[in-house]
Amino acid sequence: MKAIILIGAPGSGKGTTAEGIKAATGYIHVATGDMLREAVARGSSVGKAAESYMKQGTLVPDEVIIELVEERLDEGAPADCYMFDGFPRTQRQAELLDSSLEKRSGELANVFYLDAPRELVISRLTGRRTCRECGTIFHVVNIPPKKEGICDLCGGELYVRPDDKEDTIIRRLEVFHSQTGGLISYYEAKGVLARIDAAQPKEEIVGQAVSLMRAR
Ligand code: AMP
């Protein structure tokens, strides 16, 4: 088993980059935020435990996240290659991922830090539109759908995520800096971290990530 991680502030382009890397490499995209939104939509026990944190823009407790990820990995095969998007987000999650990989004889191959200035992430998040059906991400200015309010891929309805409101965005950025930012030096010390300038076009970002993956 092999794993890569995408770290970045909300709005740094993790989801969009992950779609590009998936198309180029076939890595399995594991986005805890998407999994939680599905759980909320289903009304499952995980969804009920997570919903209020997500609405406020704070982190869902580590135990809930770890269980979600472990269950997902248990479904996979030993040769699978995973791309984690939005996970880990705390030191504890990172350490538990280390032990989970060790238990499965897995290798953490790359960690990409999508480095984006604050004004950029705020403008990306305020203009973001997400497909309710397939989760594809659009932007009113940068990646407009062909038909307003409709997903190009599946025809689903595009909506503004409840946590993409201005005050929640500010809280999520604070949470990223206080609880997730420390992981950059954690992975730097392990020698697996690469910084990528997230202000570049998507194709550049994906291209750099994929060539770093191939170089390992
Ligand atoms: P995202 O789609 O990655 O921006 O995640 C949306 C929300 O889901 C976050 O603001 C958190 O409330 C929650 N969430 C997603 N992933 C995690 C995680 N690894 N740890 C804690 N909370 C998470």
Image (tube, rainbow, N blue to C red):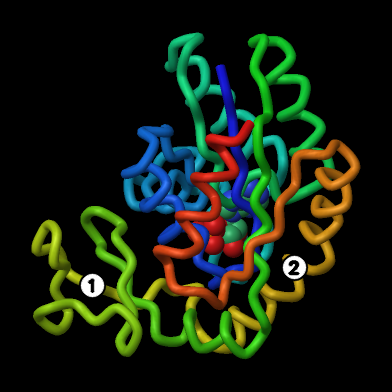
Percent x, y of residue 169: 59, 80
Q: How far apart are marks 1 and 2 (CA)?
A: 26 Å
Judge from the rendering whether residue 143 lies leftward or rightward of residue 50; answer left or right: left
Q: In which quadrant is the C terminus drawn? A: top right
Question: Which quadrant of the structure image shows residue 177?
Answer: bottom right
Question: Which quadrant of the structure image shows residue 24?
Answer: top left
Q: At numbered mark 2, what does the secondary structure look like: helix, strand or loop?
A: helix
Q: Relative to residue 161, is residue 189 depicted above or below?
A: above
Q: Does the residue labelled 2 lie within 8 Å of ligand 1?
A: yes
Q: What residue type is labelled 1?
A: Leu
Judge from the rendering whether residue 51 lies leftward or rightward of residue 59; answer left or right: left
Instruction: For residue 146, say whether it is visible.
Output: yes
Q: Relative to residue 181, is residue 108 depicted above or below?
A: above
In this view of the protein, which residue sits in the foreground, 68 or 211?
211
Q: What residue is drawn where x is 84% and y is 66%?
A: 178
Q: What residue type is labelled 2?
A: Val
Q: At numbered mark 1, what does the secondary structure look like: helix, strand or loop?
A: strand
